[in-house]
Image (cartoon, rainbow, N blue to C red):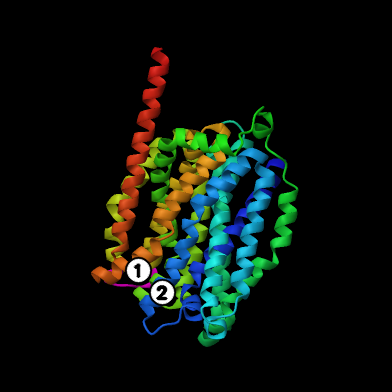
Amino acid sequence: MNKIRTVLRVTSGNFLEQFDFFLFGFYATAISHAFFPGENEFASLMLTFTVFGVGFLMRPLGAIVLGGYIDQVGRRRGLIVTLSIMASGTILIAFVPGYATIGMAAPILVLLGRIMQGFSAGAEMGGVSVYLSEIATPGHRGFYTSWQSASQQMSIVAAAAIGYLLNQTLDPAAMSAWGWRIPFVLGSAIVPFIFVLRRNLLETEAFLARQHHPDAHEVFAALLIHWKTVGVGMLQVAMTTCTFYLITVYTPTFGRSVLHLSTLDSLLVTFCVGISNFLWLPVGGALSDRIGRKPILLTISLMTMLTAYPTLSWLAAAPSFERMLTVLLCFSFYFGVYNGAMMAALTEIMPSHVRVMGFSLAFSLATAIFGGFTPAISTYLINLTGDKAAPGYWLSFAACCGFTATWWMYRQRGANREVSHES
């Protein structure tokens, strides 16, 4: 029971951070009208998704600075700091006036809010994942670490549910003018409650047992030594982060603007995808504890490579709520099972003394380069090619990265064990 309470405490903060972070993508169209008005809807959306992506560019910096800080002072204290920064960025976005009121100051302040959110999120996911891996019972690390991502899915479900209710209650003009701010205000309002939960966290025994905690200089030196590990981890994460942002953040815009389905249909699909992700993640983590991480990671990434474009082509050929739900639930299966295994694999390959920074940097680089710009790249590819299934090319490429990185990582680990045995 104590373990369950601890998991709930640490992931509740992660829920809030990701809820606030993803709202920007969910309400991209309304935000583009409020802060990036223009005659060309494509240009306005591209500006909005670019600002959305800038938040991800800040993640690697946050991973190095805040990740190193967490490795030095402890998981509990560091996670309180990341929550504080995220809350500040969310409050700024929730209450800044629109372009019509304060002109260029509006998009600049929104950009600042995204920068703060991205800087914080750079270490939040790594801090939570490492915390869960260090409190896991023997033989269940995959299952425990999967709850970091599972808590994100609940934030997706909550955001989609709130969006659905708002669209049922408010007319489109009110939703575009001010209704989109309501979820941001709700996220800001529950910040004090999450602070109380995080303050009651205990430090992990694994961290307390270490006699030496690296300072900033040692953390950066370790980063230079283990850069290959971070790079491989980044490519491994590419598969999961692209899939995730395609089926969650980009779904409302894709369904409405590209497939011309209703906003309510798109939000309902997103809601179902969040539930599906939540169910598959612990399955993937637990399954990897039984049969190993490698076969799951290789199999799922290969399946994604082969099916991403064909399934999206099938959807684009005759868009409907049923087809969109079917395709995205298929991608949800890929994401959940792969990510459930990958989270544990990533904590296992990172050196213990810089585990948070290494994990966070690998994840943040992948999110910055691949996942965070998935909505913008998908929008660009569709506009460039005229092919509504073009995002499938991007997802297949990311899956290829994940497959290659997994194969190389376990090949190297096998070679290292063989050398160690021979010596």
Q: Is residue 371 left or right of residue 7?
A: left
The magenta segment: 316-323
Q: Which residue is mark 1?
A: 379
Q: Is tag 2's residue or tag 1's residue first in the polypeptide sequence? A: 2
Taken as a whole, is the magenta stretch helix, strand or loop? helix
Label for residue 5?
none
Q: Secondary structure at mark 2?
A: helix
Q: Kindly identify which residue carries mark 2.
A: 45
Quarter of the image with the C terminus in it:
top left
* 3D distance between C-alphas at marks 2 and 1: 9 Å
Q: Position of residue 285 (x, y in %)?
A: 50, 42
Provide residue 103's location: percent of width, then percent of height: 53, 82
Check whether the beta carbons of the residues at disc 2 and disc 1 lie within 8 A of each other: yes
What type is the residue that disc 1 sits on? Thr
Which residue is at 37% across, 29% downward?
412
How packed mark 1 is, by other alpha carbons closer than 10 Å (few <14, some 14-19, many 20 or more), is: many
Disc 2: CA contacts within 10 A as few (<14), some (14-19) or many (>=20): many
Q: Quadrant of the N terminus?
A: top right
The question of residue 266 being in magenta is answered with no
Task: Tell me if residue 319 is in the magenta stretch.
Answer: yes
Q: Is residue 156 visible?
A: no
Residue type, mark 2 in image? Leu
Q: Residue at x 38, y 13 (%)?
A: 422
Residue 130 in the figure: left or right of residue 199: left
Q: Pinpoint residue 73: horizontal percent, then vertical percent.
A: 67, 40
Question: In the picture shown, does residue 3 fall above or below 89?
Answer: above
- Residue lying furthest top in this view? 423
Q: Quadrant of residue 85?
A: bottom right
Q: Position of residue 69 (x, y in %)?
A: 62, 43
